[in-house]
């Protein structure tokens, strides 16, 4: 295999560090890895893919392999527009939702501009922001709406007092990476209000939104402020990451800038893959497969929550995600999850230290655990092992 | 169809201009379009693609749809390394060779840095360079080696005198876009020497290199200066553009920067498509298909050259490309190919005005003609029509 299962989209940089050398010393197949943000390979409907590919070749012929429109092929844009009830003009297909984050940062940010986000937040986004020399300002999460609003307003006012320009606020409203937490409708409304009040955009990154295992869906931030929000979606978690396809729904004036930039970036998203994705959506295969994926992930989440409950020592807490791929552990004050990592890996368990998701590199005593990728058997062995190691550490 | 055949990778921006509205008024199927840089759809071996896709699904299973390595899948990197006789460590797969141009510019260029290139040069590269606020310095082509060296050295010295940093020289050595011209071995050696002497990199963009219709291949610039050259290749013209795959061969210290940047960009190239491309190369299908493509394009080139000879009025000259997709027309002084465009399109012929490829927006009396995309029947009607319109214009 090309890529050890420990690796993931948002942990590459971490593993590019000296830590990477560890992989040369360990037998990867024996590792219980809760590090990666991988979907489970079981959820990829290979027969469906195979059938759709034949269909696309038969029906589209050479057109499926020629250059295509920078915005994406009409069929896929229309399928996304229909699913999310937006006009097709507001839909841009991206070569992965990571590209959506990157291209928006590129067209919107000048060096020194402020990007607001939750602290902690998605590592891959923070890296992209910092690569454009944005000033990334993290605001700690909080469930009380009044306090939530106060924290954001305080951060905003401080930026403005310092003469900074706030270009956008980056939010993962559903089953956040890394925390697994979901913003309430009230919290979303607060963000939408702030965007209007202070005149900045919201980038709503929603790669996990369709993976809800309990409770009712909450309206997107986009639906509350369609004029001030760009909503990013991904096929990676509802179809397969190997297609590298995502979408962007947003105001046409933002999409117009994205269009021009995307020409320079890669001209257009992969054409054949887009037709396959369009068929996957319009045929109903996506919805059928999503139900199966959700059942699988729900059971893995429940298993991990139960094992944490049964095995973790006192003083360790964790989030209860209503969906997505991750939960977030908080260990006792003074615990250093980065330092502990070598020991855990040597014993056979991997995670991502929470510090890497913090804009200010705080969160030393936190870690992110993924529950989608490992088999139930490995979860059953890996979590008690991790708990034992943590106990010994104390 | 999503995308009018007139459009192409490097003409999008052109058509984003008010000119685009013309398309609403003309019947696209009746246009003779020599504008786009499209390969001919006839060259896409659909049966081969279909077979290989089944094979990849059968043999790789879910792995072909999971996240993959940022550098690209090992099988494809190895196939490229073998074909071009370089170590695999020097191969990075890109999500289109356009991405290669973009990512190199992003990791190498600070605002105000100089990028040297031929004048004219590939529009999509110039746009990418300018989007990073590079100072793009174009040097007019010239077949005499001594004069060729003098021109480059003069441009370089002028930049250095002005306190500028020259980061890289961008060259399309084989069948240049837009001119169709090929650098001699001596010219390539001059560029390699200059790179060493002045300590800059060469970006050798080689999307057409394998499409040679006459004469012997000339060693790449990369082979003359592997320590100072990044060679960019593309699957778009030897397989199909719809896969959006290319490659980069270069020094490991450059590829290391590209690796980190590509994580932020899109994490990894499309996985399934990479496996299909790897099989296409290693099975021998690529070479077999390439022979067919070359025969087709050679005959189209010859047809266009003959028709130009027979129909163009005196005072019009054109290049004789030994390969690639384009030839370049020079019209009498004072001819304005941008202004003439509306008239030509209204009459049913499209091209790209040469001005758009010039770093200084000179070349008003030039135009680029593509001979790969249109059928022989359309070439036979379109070129005499274009010639007639030019005659009337004089």
Image: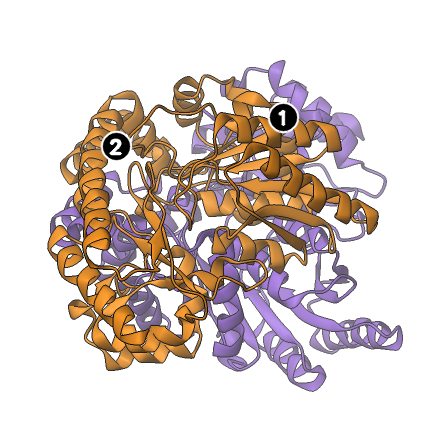
Chain colours: A orange, B purple
- Say which residue appears at 86% left-offset and 75% top-offset: B163
Q: Nearer the viewer, mark 2 or mark 1?
A: 1
Front-lying residue, B56 or B357:
B56
- The correct choice, above or below, for B69 with respect to A122 in the image is below
| Residue B31 at least partly seen | no
Residue that lies at the very extreme toward the bottom in this rendered image: B197
- Say which residue appears at 69% left-offset and 76% top-offset: B145
Residue that badge 2 annotates: A57
Residue that badge 1 annotates: A252
Drawn side of residue A299 relative to residue B85, left or right:
left
Crowding at dot 1, Cα within 10 Å, few <14 / some 14-19 / many 20+, comes out as some
Q: Quadrant of the C terminus of chain A?
A: bottom left
Q: Position of residue A319 (x, y in %)?
A: 36, 47
Front-lying residue, A262 or B183:
A262
Q: CA distance from mark 2 to mark 1?
A: 32 Å
| Residue B18 at least partly seen | yes
Q: Position of residue A371 (x, y in %)?
A: 26, 50
Q: Chain of mark 1?
A: A
Drawn side of residue A311 relative to residue A173, left or right:
left
Front-lying residue, A135 or B203:
A135
- The correct choice, above or below, for B358 with respect to B253 in the image is above
Q: Which is nearer the N-term, disc 2 or disc 1?
A: 2
Drawn side of residue A363 relative to residue B81, left or right:
right
Secondary structure at numbered mark 1 = helix
- Say which residue appears at 75% left-offset and 29% top-offset: B340
Query: Which quarter of the picture shows residue A208?
Result: top left
Secondary structure at numbered mark 2 = helix
Crowding at dot 2, Cα within 10 Å, few <14 / some 14-19 / many 20+, comes out as many
Drawn side of residue A236 relative to residue B330, left or right:
left
Q: Position of residue A383 (x, y in %)?
A: 21, 60
């Amino acid at each position: 295999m090309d890529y050890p299962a420990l690796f993931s989209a948002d942990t590459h940089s971490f593993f590019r560090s000296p830590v990477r050398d560890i992989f040369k010393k360990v037998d990867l197949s024996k590792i219980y890895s809760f590090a990666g943000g991988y979907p489970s390979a079981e959820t990829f409907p290979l027969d469906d893919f195979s059938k759709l590919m034949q269909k696309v070749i038969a029906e589209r012929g050479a057109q499926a392999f020629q250059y295509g429109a920078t915005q994406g092929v009409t069929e896929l844009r229309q399928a996304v527009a229909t699913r999310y009830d937006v006009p097709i003009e507001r839909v841009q297909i991206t070569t992965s939702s990571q590209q959506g984050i990157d291209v928006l940062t590129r067209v919107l940010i000048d060096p020194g501009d402020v990007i607001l986000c939750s602290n902690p937040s998605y590592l891959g986004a923070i890296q992209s922001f910092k690569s454009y020399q944005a000033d990334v300002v993290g605001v700690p999460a909080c469930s009380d709406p009044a306090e939530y609003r106060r924290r954001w307003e305080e951060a905003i006012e401080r930026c403005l007092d310092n003469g900074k320009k706030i270009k956008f606020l980056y939010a993962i409203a559903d089953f956040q990476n890394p925390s697994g937490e979901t913003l309430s409708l009230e919290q979303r409304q607060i963000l939408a209000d702030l965007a209007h009040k202070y005149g900045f955009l919201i980038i709503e990154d929603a790669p996990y939104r369709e993976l809800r295992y309990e409770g009712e869906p909450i309206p997107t931030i986009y639906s509350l402020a369609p004029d001030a929000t760009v909503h990013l979606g991904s096929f990676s978690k509802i179809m397969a990451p190997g297609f590298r396809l995502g979408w962007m729904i947003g105001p046409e004036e933002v999409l117009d800038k994205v269009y021009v930039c995307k020409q320079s970036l890669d001209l257009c998203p992969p054409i054949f893959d887009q037709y396959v994705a369009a068929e996957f959506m319009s045929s109903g295969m996506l919805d059928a497969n999503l139900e199966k994926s959700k059942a699988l992930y729900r059971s893995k989440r429940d298993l991990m929550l139960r094992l944490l409950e049964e095995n973790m020592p006192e003083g360790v807490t964790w989030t209860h995600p209503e969906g997505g791929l991750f939960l977030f552990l908080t260990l006792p004050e003074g615990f250093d999850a980065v330092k502990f990592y070598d020991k855990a890996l040597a014993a056979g368990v991997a995670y991502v230290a929470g510090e890497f998701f913090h804009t200010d590199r705080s969160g030393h005593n936190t870690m992110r655990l993924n529950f989608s990728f490992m088999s139930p058997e490995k979860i059953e062995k890996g979590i008690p092992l991790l708990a034992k190691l943590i106990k010994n550490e104390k």
